[in-house]
Image (spheres, helix red, strand yellow):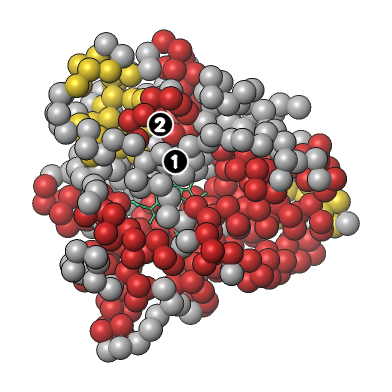
Amino acid sequence: MQFPFSRSTDPHVDLSSADAFNEGAPFATFDRMRREDPLAWAEMVNGDLGFWSVTRHADLLELNRQPDLLSSARGIRMEDQTEEEYEARKTFQETDPPVHRAFRALAAKAFAKGTVAQYEERIRAIVTSLLDQALEEGEFDAVDRIARRLPMQMLAQIIGVPLEDGPWLVEKGDALISNADPDYTDFVIDQVDTEAYRLLPFRSPAAVELFDYANGLLDRMDAGEQIGVLNLVREPTSHGTQMSRDEFRNFFCLLVAAGNDTTRYSISATIHALANDADLLRKLRDGELASWESATDELIRWASPTTHFRRTATRDFEYHGRKIKAGDKVLLWFIAGNRDETAIEDPYTIRLDRGRNPFLSFGQGGPHICLGMWLAKLEVMIVMQEFASRVKSLEQIAPHSYLRSNFIHGIKHLPVRVVAR
Ligand code: HEM
């Protein structure tokens, strides 16, 4: 059975506007672009420089693996940044190899597959406790009750901060990364003057508070204390350099933002799917899947929580007959690649038995492939497993709403009714 994840049907939305995603991702627009204009040019609604859009799966794979041609070192989001803004806000995510590789290697140890596998029981304990409370209520907002809570409850343990700080970190992380949604910030990036915050991550004043928090952690580490996995990223790299205090503060903001909301929106998309297609829950329960890993990949493909990442051309080149100039902004719309039927058969259907799944939600193929991928996958998988074993029926009981953002894609409220088995 097919059911729509998005309510958006317009094939000509303005991708530079956060409002274009208010009714869910504009899949009809991406379908048209892949078909008619695989390297489309668009102007920015706010007067920033225009951008090229890459929407075909094969092109995304090909271009994402060429950081020498398409660099991350001029920013990774749509907004233009001055050199000063870029320097003040950058993390290793906004650098290219070899500098990128050296810093990533430090953090990668903390989020490697084998390391993350050790968290399985702790994740299951969190999910079980969240689900227990929710099942008792019977009717609840699945995002508020489960999806928004799990990622930070786990991340707090990994980075070694008190669990009680979790809700505050979620709130601040939301203010950063959901900076276009008035539900999460008073400083809505395209509606309010954020010039005073232009040197802060996401141009958000919430970063000031997170910087203070990170300063406290830095002071403790400098005094010799071990704080979760955070000391790892302050070790010298193989090049003998060390992450500066400024870079650490930015990295901490990245973790709090990236480790929080993307997994949340994978979980909310998963619960939305299970609530709208009873057969999916039955298949999970009866084991009609290629494997739990492949069911997880399929739901994260379906969810596509990060719509795009930006690159900047390092030199003039031609692609699909278009002339791209050095300095041009090129957006890699991973979400569009995830619905490309030339790579993924029947992409608008969730197939738990898909097996091989060349999805791009984590920026696969590129040097920046998501560092938190194994953690996110494990969390989504355990949510599915616990729903399958504990829930008899699940239905959506009122319309859901979407985050206002053209960068992060997801359901922010999802009213459901559950009956326990
Ligand atoms: C389903 C959940 C998630 C999705 C869809 C996702 C998506 C992505 C994508 C697409 C990239 C590549 C960016 C690029 O190409 O420029 C990325 C990078 C990154 N992600 Fe995730 N992410 C998720 C969860 C997480 C979690 C849980 C964490 C941390 C705990 C995390 C931390 C990072 C970091 C630090 C990077 C930068 C890596 C680098 O530049 O080398 N992500 N993520």
Q: Is mark 1 within 8 Å of ligand 1?
A: no
- State the image coordinates of residue 241 (x, y, percent, origin top left): 18, 67
Q: Residue at x 49, y 52 (%)?
A: 373
Disc 2, SS: helix
Q: Is residue 75 above or below residue 108?
A: above
- State the image coordinates of residue 67 (x, y, percent, origin top left): 26, 39
Q: Nearer the viewer, residue 25 or 181?
A: 25
Q: Nearer the viewer, residue 355 or 297?
A: 355
Where is residue 161, by image quadrant?
bottom left
Residue linked to disc 2? 61
**Spatial CA span between label 2 and label 1:** 7 Å
Q: Residue at x 81, y 37 (%)?
A: 279
Residue linked to disc 1? 364
- State the image coordinates of residue 421 (x, y, percent, origin top left): 88, 57
Disc 1, SS: loop
Q: Residue at x 38, y 17 (%)?
A: 38
